[in-house]
Every structure is written in C-alpha cells, then in structure tokens.
Image: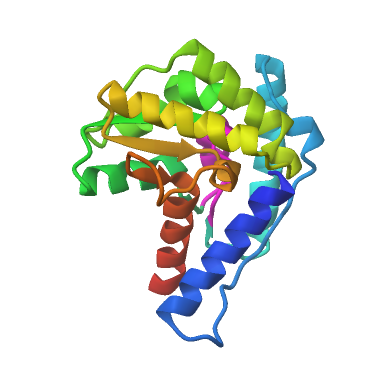
C-alpha cells in the first residue's frame, strides 16, 4: 500500500530469488502500487467496503495481466482478503498464514502480535495465526495506541526516529518479562525501527515470511 511497503517487498523478493538462483536473476513481478490516501487508517465499515472494492479491482487487473498469484503487501488490508479472494481465480498468499507456519515450525507457544489497531485487536488476522497452534497474548490498550500512532504518523510516511525505536524496544522487553516466547511484527514498516536480531525475544517479521512465501511460489513455477 505505502511506497515504503512496495519498496521493501520488491527488494526482498528479488534478493531471495538471487540467493536461490544467481546474481544475474531477478523476480518476474507485476506491481500495482495503489494510491494510499484513500486507504489510510480506515475505521468505518463503509471505508473498508471501499477498500475491498479498490483491492478487488486491482486484483482483477493483475490477474488479467497474467499474474499467477498475488500478495497483498499490507497486513491491515488482509481484513478484506476473503472478499478479494472470492473475486478472482488465482491464489492470494495470506500473510498471516506464512508467519503462523513459521511460528509453528519454531515451536513457539505464546507470541505477541504488534501492528496497526485492526491487526492487533481484530479476529481476521489473529485467528489465521492461532489456527497454526500458536497462542497470541491479548494486546494491552496502551501498546495498541502507541504502536498504531507510530505506524500511521511516522513509519508509513518514511519517518524513522530514535523515540520510536526506544518505544518498540521497551514494549518487547516488557512482553518478555510477562511470559511471551516471541514477537510478531505485523506491519511492513515496523522493521524500520525494530532490529530483529537485537532483542530479548525472537522476532518474526511478517514481511519477511510473506516475501519468502512469494519467492518460493516463483521458484516452484
């Protein structure tokens, strides 16, 4: 959705294809970067209905252009996944399934989900992970407010601050103290302020697991 997200997906998928094949190879991709203003911080059901229509139209264009599978490069927009999937005849790789599988493979029992408010609090995302046998610890409202604000007011605008880095590190440390086994970063841009290799808990980045699933699909073709 945001240009920051588009850039992250493009770079990561191509690097994975290079690693699997050769430095000369790249990923065959069709990219539709949507106008993000109308999809920003949705709250009302009527707004989500419009978002579903926008994504359905986009998915149909990509299918008609020859795409064999689709990734929706935004965690929150998976709220309308079912409606988009019903409107086309090709696979949509669900981002929550990719991280749910990764958590299960790593034998994680209790994880904390960090992302936008809809992702952290609503069932459309949480249940897709839980069905892989992973328990998601209930979010705390103060954390939901803080993370949602950092994502929409800073990260999605390409702004990275030390205050945001410290805030996320504090949240992760506190979750470890309360018994969490892992953190799930469920926002493409959160990787800008969370060092996945330098925290007290293992960090599973949905952007990473989603891009890996996309690369695996390409390599299998």
Query: What main secondary structure does the magenta stretch of the protein show?
Result: helix
Using the image as rendered, state which of residue 156 and residue 51 is in the foreground.
Answer: 156
The residue lying at 48 percent from left, 74 percent from top is 17
- Residue 64 at what x, y percent from top left? 66, 59
Asked if residue 187 shows in the view, the reply is: yes
In the image, which residues are magenta? 70-89
- Residue 219 at what x, y percent from top left? 42, 73
Query: Number of numbered discs present?
Result: 0
On the rendered structure, is 171 left or right of 202?
Answer: right
Asked if 129 appears above or below 141 in the picture, the reply is below
- Residue 74 at what x, y percent from top left? 59, 41
Asked if residue 60 shows in the view, the reply is: no
Q: Quadrant of residue 104?
A: top left
Asked if 131 appears above or below 85 in the picture, the reply is above
Using the image as rendered, state which of residue 38 and residue 14 is in the foreground.
Answer: 14
On the rendered structure, is 160 left or right of 193?
Answer: right
Quadrant in which the N terminus is drawn: top right
**Does residue 95 belong to the magenta stretch?**
no
Asked if 179 appears above or below 25 in the picture, the reply is above
- Residue 7 at what x, y percent from top left? 67, 58
**Does residue 75 belong to the magenta stretch?**
yes
Outermost residue toward the top in this view: 141
Quadrant in which the C terminus is drawn: bottom left
């Amino acid at each position: 959705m945001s240009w920051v997200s588009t850039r992250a997906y493009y770079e990561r998928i191509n690097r994975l294809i290079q690693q699997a094949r050769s430095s000369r190879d790249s990923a065959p991709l069709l990219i539709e970067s949507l106008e993000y203003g109308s999809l920003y911080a949705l709250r009302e059901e009527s707004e989500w209905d419009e978002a579903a229509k926008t994504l359905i139209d986009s998915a149909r264009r990509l299918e008609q252009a020859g795409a064999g599978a689709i990734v929706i490069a935004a965690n929150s927009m998976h709220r309308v996944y079912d409606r988009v999937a019903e409107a086309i005849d090709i696979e949509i790789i669900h981002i929550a399934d990719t991280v749910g599988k990764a958590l299960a493979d790593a034998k994680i029992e209790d994880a904390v989900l960090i992302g936008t408010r809809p992702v952290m609090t609503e069932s459309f995302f949480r249940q897709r992970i839980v069905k892989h046998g992973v328990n998601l610890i209930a979010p705390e409202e103060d954390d939901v407010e803080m993370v949602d604000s950092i994502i929409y007011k800073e990260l999605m605008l390409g702004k990275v601050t030390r205050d945001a880095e410290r805030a996320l590190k504090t949240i992760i440390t506190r979750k470890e103290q309360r018994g969490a086994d892992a953190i799930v970063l469920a926002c493409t841009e959160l990787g800008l302020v969370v060092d996945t290799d330098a925290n007290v808990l293992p960090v599973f980045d949905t952007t990473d697991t989603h891009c890996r699933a996309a690369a695996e699909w390409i390599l299998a073709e």
